[in-house]
Image (cartoon, rainbow, N blue to C red):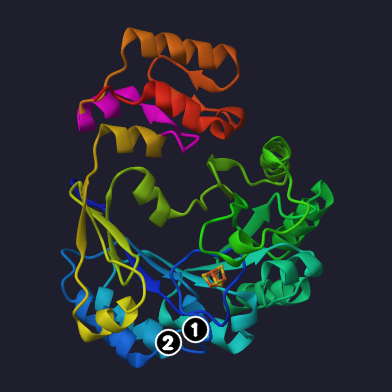
Amino acid sequence: MQQNHRPLGVYMHIPYCPAKCRYCDFFSRPGSRSVPQEYCGALLLELRGLPRRPDTLYFGGGTPALLSPAQVSALIEAANPLPGAEITLEANPDTVNAELLKEFCAAGVTRISFGVQSADNEQLRRLGRLHTAAAAAQALEWAVRAGFEEICGDIMLALPGYTTGEFDRTLSLLKNGGCTHISAYLLKIEPGTAFYKNPPADLPDADAAADFYLYAVRRLEEEGYPQYEISNFARPEHRGRHNLLYWDCQDYLGIGPAAHSCMEGVRRFWPAGPGAVDAFIAGTLTEEAEGVCNAEDYLMLRLRLRDGLDLTQYAERFGGQFTSAQFAFVRHCVSAGYAEFDGRVLRLTPEGLIVQNGILAELLPAE
Ligand code: SF4
């Protein structure tokens, strides 16, 4: 990387899915089998205006694996990423086959991310997922054979009737399938979802969910996936470079309805909602301002990372500084097992990450 190089990540939102999962509040159009060429055309137009060559590209959604390899190839070519760029594509196990994965790899995708969620077929059905555990294992095997060296799998925690056994079976599925990176998320019931209208029975309470989270962190570390962010775990040298740009307040540019950007500290977003996809295709959807990235954002984002908040960087980049009362609170967090502090870098432990909101409330800069 050149000196003074300012990294850039580009996110493309693909708002199409075969069906709507019952917990999902991402912006996507269910009932889709492919991505209209007009939508790709609108993305291509936006890519023409990139300020510089990106270090990372991320196809997120929705279900980006509904893009054809030719569409993916055209979008990568238009983005003109730097040599060695990380290029991630999210996929569902039921939307890929061996040939398609080979073609995505040949198109330039370097990192494939599967929403596996659980190895329990009954759980998958309850979530509204269209794949089975066997289909997930098959998709991972195809991805390895296609030549992907970066393979990610998502696990959802604290699902209805959850047990540590379900977690262990899901972790084995991902590990045996060759995953280099695992994201593990607690289920959240979001407004507007099918689960919000009809909550599933037998949901773990907050204390049980926290225990499942701590169990997951421990088991993932034991299996060679150290935690590097509140919900992300990776083999050494396999952290996700794109999301690390978000958590370090670097530049990222989102394209498509519901996508967010932060360029040189200025945040913007593309509106989502009824009509947004058609308006984006027609070229009439416009980005809206979302404020600026400040010391508060940097502190919140850095404390998601196990690498933590470097107080020198906090001061140099955002003018942030702890008061003596805040240093006293940090010492209290350390003695309670919620944090580690070496005088310069503050890191939250997994126990601290669970109660992160309470810790942040004490450490945020005064208004
Ligand atoms: S969870 Fe993923 S696949 Fe399911 S509806 Fe949401 S975006 Fe689509």
Confirm whether the magenta stretch covers residue 305: yes
Q: Which quadrant would residue 38 be assigned to in this image? A: bottom left
Which label number is shown at residue 215?
none
Badge 2 is on which residue?
Answer: 35
Residue found at the far right of this picture: 165
* Residue 153 seen by the camera: no
Q: The residue under label 1 is which amino acid type?
A: Leu
- Depth check, front residue: 144 or 51: 51
Asked whether, in this view, residue 24 is left or right of residue 291, the answer is: right
Q: Secondary structure at mark 2?
A: loop
Q: CA distance from mark 1 to mark 2?
A: 6 Å
Q: Secondary structure at mark 1?
A: helix
Q: Residue at x 44, y 23 (%)?
A: 346
Q: Number of marks in the image?
A: 2
- Asked if labels 2 and 1 touch by Cβ distance under 8 angstroms, the answer is yes
Confirm whether the magenta stretch covers residue 207: no
* Residue 60 seen by the camera: yes
Residue found at the far front of this picture: 197
Q: Residues within 10 Å of mark 2 (few under 14, many from 20)?
A: some
- Depth check, front residue: 244 or 1: 244
**Ligand 1 rendered quadrant:** bottom right
Q: Residue at x 71, y 54 (%)?
A: 159
Q: Is residue 97 above or below residue 245?
A: below
Q: Is residue 17 above or below residue 243?
A: below
Q: Residue at x 35, y 49 (%)?
A: 246
Q: Residues within 10 Å of mark 1 (few under 14, many from 20)?
A: many
Q: Quadrant of the C terminus?
A: top left
Badge 1 is on which residue?
Answer: 66
x and y percentages locating residue 143 in the rendered image = 61, 74
x and y percentages locating residue 52 in the rendered image = 18, 64
**Residues rendered magenta in the picture:** 303-318
Disc nearer the start of the sequence (1/2): 2
